[in-house]
Image (spheres, rainbow, N blue to C red):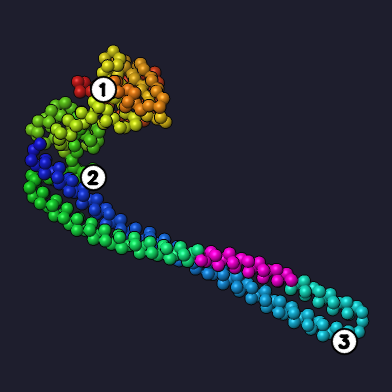
Amino acid sequence: MPTDLEQLVELQRVDEEAARLQALLDAIPKMLARIDAQLAAARQRVEQAKAAIAAGEAEKRRHDQEIQSLNDQIAKFRSQSSSVKTNEQYKALLSEISHAEGQISSHEEKIIEVMLNADTLQGKLARAEAALKAESAEIERQKSEATRESETDKIALKAAQARAGEIRKAVDENLLSTYDRIRGSRGNGLAEVLEQRCTACQVMLRPQLYSNLRAGSAIIQCDSCGRLLYYVPEHNVSTAAANTSGIAHQAEREWMFVPELGTSGAFAVFSNHRGNATMKAYDAVTGEAIAHRVEKNATYQSIFASELRNARNLFVDQAGVENKFKEQLPQEFLEDLRHQLPNS
Ligand SMILES: [Zn+2]
């Protein structure tokens, strides 16, 4: 790999670390505001419980006063009863007294209700106060942890920024400005190539570019996303080794070119779904469906290991193509897959 490119690979690593730390630091005020809001909500629940209790007490006092004034009325009626002249007047007084007594018992019932409710409200208040206490302690803990972490992050961020500054001095100016420009628009300026594919945008490299890249003879940009490309031979060796042992095939669904199927190879989609492994294959020349196998309680990586042995990854960005075109792949899609094959 050209030295400048090696420097850029490190620069990107440092830049990404700095961005990660900056994002953590930026998130802190929001987090503090969120936990403050939590605390305010817990305080409000306590205040609400206290207000409900006070309202209950006021209601009880009101009923007590009503009873007091009704008792006064009854006493007054009783004292009048000795001076009434007629039976009708006496009856009328008795009726007033019994009416007032009826009102008193209805106020007494209300008081019992209020007192029962007060017990429930006291329980609520006790729970709200306990929750507030626990929450306050937890929030204090979170705040001091956030403060401590942010101090560490600030120091690490400074170190990353200083390191980035050093690397930038050592890299060719034009290359650096290309890196910065792509990073500005794409989030990062550099992408590794694995299995002839740009790992950032997943597009296959043209064979000529790929061999130039591997030779390390020039700085190469991805045709599709424009990122500066780099190639680490060891990473590709390990991927190839893992492929033959099946370890690299961890995806739950992927399109592959299988050279052993069909007249001269097949495009097949492998998937794991609800414990079933599926392989659906189409002839690479005609696009006709040639195989559809579903195996219960299996993964395609193990059950179709022999089909996968020499298979090659394909990039397909539309989901469910095989469900839409059960018998025959459309020409356009077929051509797109063929273009991803190295000798096309
Ligand atoms: Zn790309």
Q: Does residue 208 appear in the picture of this structure?
A: yes
The Cα–Cα distance between marks 1 and 2, rounded to whole angstroms, is 36 Å
x, y (%) of residue 34?
38, 59
Question: In the image, which is nearer the foreground, mark 1 or mark 3?
Answer: 1
Looking at the rendered image, the disc whose residue lies closer to the viewer, 3 or 2, is 3
Q: Closer to the N terminus: mark 3 or mark 2?
A: 3
User: Mark 2, residues whose alpha carbon is within 10 Å: few (<14), some, or many (≥20)?
Assistant: few
Q: Where is residue 205 in the image (x, y as percent from the top left)?
A: 19, 29
Q: Residue at x 31, y 32 (%)?
A: 251
Residues 175 and 95: in front is: 95
Question: Mark 3 sits on what residue?
Answer: 83
For label 2, the SS is loop
258 versus 193 height, above or below: above
> Residue pushed farthest right?
86
Q: Earlier in the sequence, mark 1 or mark 2?
A: 2
**Residue at numbered disc 2:** 187
Is 120 a magenta residue? yes
Task: From the image, state whether disc 1 or disc 2 is nearer to you.
Answer: 1
- Could you tell me the amino acid type at mark 3? Ser
Q: Is residue 83 left or right of residue 313?
A: right
Which mark is drawn over residue 35? none
In the image, the segment drawn in magenta is 105-126
x and y percentages locating residue 73 in the rendered image = 76, 81
Q: Which mark is residue 309?
A: 1
| Picture quadrant where residue 210 is located | top left
Residue 284 placement, left or right of 166: right
Which is nearer the N-term, disc 1 or disc 3?
3
Ligand 1 closer than 8 Å to label 1 CB: no
Does the magenta run of residues contain 70? no
Q: Are discs 1 and 2 less than 8 Å apart at CB?
A: no
Quarter residue 344 falls in = top left
